[in-house]
């Protein structure tokens, strides 16, 4: 059969959100079917484009912040995001006021074990803070920009610095369960490989620049304060600085994937944190992030190490909760003193 342009048929069609709730709608603009001139077979070419993301406007973010301020008059300068099993940090907050996520219009709801699902505003070691007792994950079905929505809300509450925490597995053989890794850099796989950066979509210059630099995403001075705090508490030997990689989850990584990540420079791997970090830097917030190492990843096929489980993650976090809460308690004081001195 010879190639005949007359055989080409164009069909216009569209479907709504074909890829599920985590992705923008996909519009199939045209389907072209024709006889291939070399293969002598009929082939189909589909051209697609992503429809605009349903971004919240700056006014909608302000409305969420105003709702919180009306509930709890506040002016926090530090925001804290608690990872899996780390909500115990909130137990050190005094004169705190809880607001359940489900009671905040326009907010999301945590669906993962180990995340309490509430905002807590109060005093932590003499510093007014807003604390997320549980976060939102991409694997829960939320797009990455929605996972980071609380960061934008924090900015409109007055926050200038965020502490972002997570539970992670180690791919660095020198790390042990219970260690803490301060993030000095990251590999954002869903962004690099899947185009799932939380900044994709229309940019509002009032929130941040179109193309923010992440070269210094993790504030060096804040990392120094964190290490000084660990030293003062006698924890320095279990603290590291390293590279965190985000996997979309919810499945844990394969051995091949883990070895690939290690060869790419990763020290620890998890399923969160980076949407918040990228968004925080976009809107001008300083960032300190750390991982509690809750399991040592299996890097060899004949390993007799137990397979990772969510239960293991929570158990390790609970075993270290007093240490972590004490660390953050003293950390915010040091950060506040540094901010006041600037």
Image: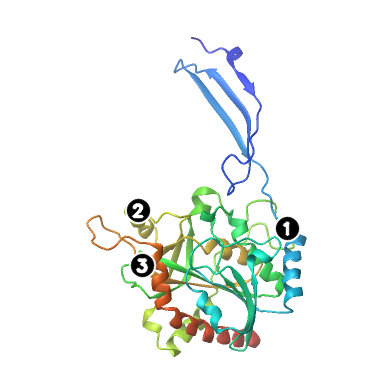
Q: Residues within 10 Å of mark 3 (few under 14, many from 20)?
A: many
Secondary structure under tag 1 reads loop
Q: Nearer the viewer, residue 206 or 90?
A: 90
Question: In the image, what residue occupies the spot 54% across and 81% down?
Answer: 91
Q: Nearer the viewer, residue 328 or 306?
A: 306
Question: In the image, what residue occupies the spot 40% across and 88% down?
Answer: 234
Disc on res. 96: none
Q: Is residue 198 visible?
A: no
Secondary structure under tag 3 reads strand
- Measured in 3D between alpha carbons, the distance from the residue under mark 2 to the one under mark 1, in whole angstroms, is 39 Å
Q: Is residue 272 visible?
A: yes
Which quadrant of the view contains residue 111?
A: bottom right
- Measured in 3D between alpha carbons, the distance from the residue under mark 3 to the one under mark 2, in whole angstroms, is 14 Å
Disc on res. 254: 2
Secondary structure under tag 2 reads loop
| Circle 3/circle 2 CB separation < 8 Å | no
| Circle 2/circle 1 CB separation < 8 Å | no
Question: In the image, what residue occupies the spot 45% across and 68% down?
Answer: 167
In this picture, residue 289 sits left or right of residue 171:
right
Which quadrant of the view contains residue 17?
A: top right
| Residue that mark 1 sits on | 204
Which quadrant of the view contains residue 211?
A: bottom right
Q: Nearer the viewer, residue 341 or 257?
A: 257
Disc 3 or 2, which lies upstream in sequence? 2
- Measured in 3D between alpha carbons, the distance from the residue under mark 3 to the one under mark 1, in whole angstroms, is 40 Å
| Residue that mark 3 sits on | 295
Residue 63 position in % (x across, y down): 76, 65
Residue 299 position in % (x across, y down): 30, 59
Q: Residues within 10 Å of mark 2 (few under 14, many from 20)?
A: few
Here the colouring is rainbow
For residue 315, above or below residue 48: below
């Amino acid at each position: 059969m010879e190639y005949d342009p007359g055989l080409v048929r164009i069909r216009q069609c569209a479907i709504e959100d074909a890829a599920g709730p985590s992705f923008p709608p996909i519009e199939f603009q045209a389907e072209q079917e024709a006889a291939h001139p070399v293969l002598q077979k009929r082939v189909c070419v589909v051209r697609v484009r992503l429809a605009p993301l349903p971004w919240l406007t700056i006014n909608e973010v302000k409305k969420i912040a105003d709702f919180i301020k009306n509930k709890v008059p506040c002016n926090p300068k530090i925001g804290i995001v608690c990872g899996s099993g780390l909500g115990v940090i909130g137990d050190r907050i005094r004169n705190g006021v809880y607001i359940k996520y489900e009671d905040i219009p326009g907010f999301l709801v945590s669906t993962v074990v180990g995340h309490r699902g509430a905002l807590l505003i109060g005093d932590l070691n003499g510093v007014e803070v807003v604390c997320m007792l549980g976060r939102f994950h991409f694997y829960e079905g939320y797009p990455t920009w929605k996972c980071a929505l609380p960061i934008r809300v924090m900015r409109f509450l007055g926050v200038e610095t965020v502490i972002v925490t997570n539970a992670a597995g180690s791919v660095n053989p020198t790390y042990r369960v219970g260690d803490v890794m301060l993030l000095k850099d990251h590999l954002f796989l869903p962004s690099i490989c899947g185009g799932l950066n939380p900044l994709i979509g229309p940019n509002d210059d009032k929130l941040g620049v179109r193309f923010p630099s992440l070269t210094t995403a993790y504030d060096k001075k804040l990392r120094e304060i964190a290490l000084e705090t660990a030293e003062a508490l006698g924890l320095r030997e279990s603290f590291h600085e390293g590279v965190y990689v985000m996997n979309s989850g919810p499945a844990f990584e394969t051995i091949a994937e883990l070895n690939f990540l290690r060869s790419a420079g990763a020290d620890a791997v998890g399923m969160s944190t980076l949407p918040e970090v990228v968004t925080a830097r976009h809107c001008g917030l300083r960032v300190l992030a750390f991982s509690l190492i809750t399991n040592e990843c299996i890097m060899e096929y004949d390993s007799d190490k137990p397979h990772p489980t969510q239960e293991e993650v929570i158990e390790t976090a609970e075993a270290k909760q007093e240490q972590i809460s004490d660390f953050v308690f003293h950390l915010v004081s040091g950060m506040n003193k540094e901010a006041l001195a600037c």
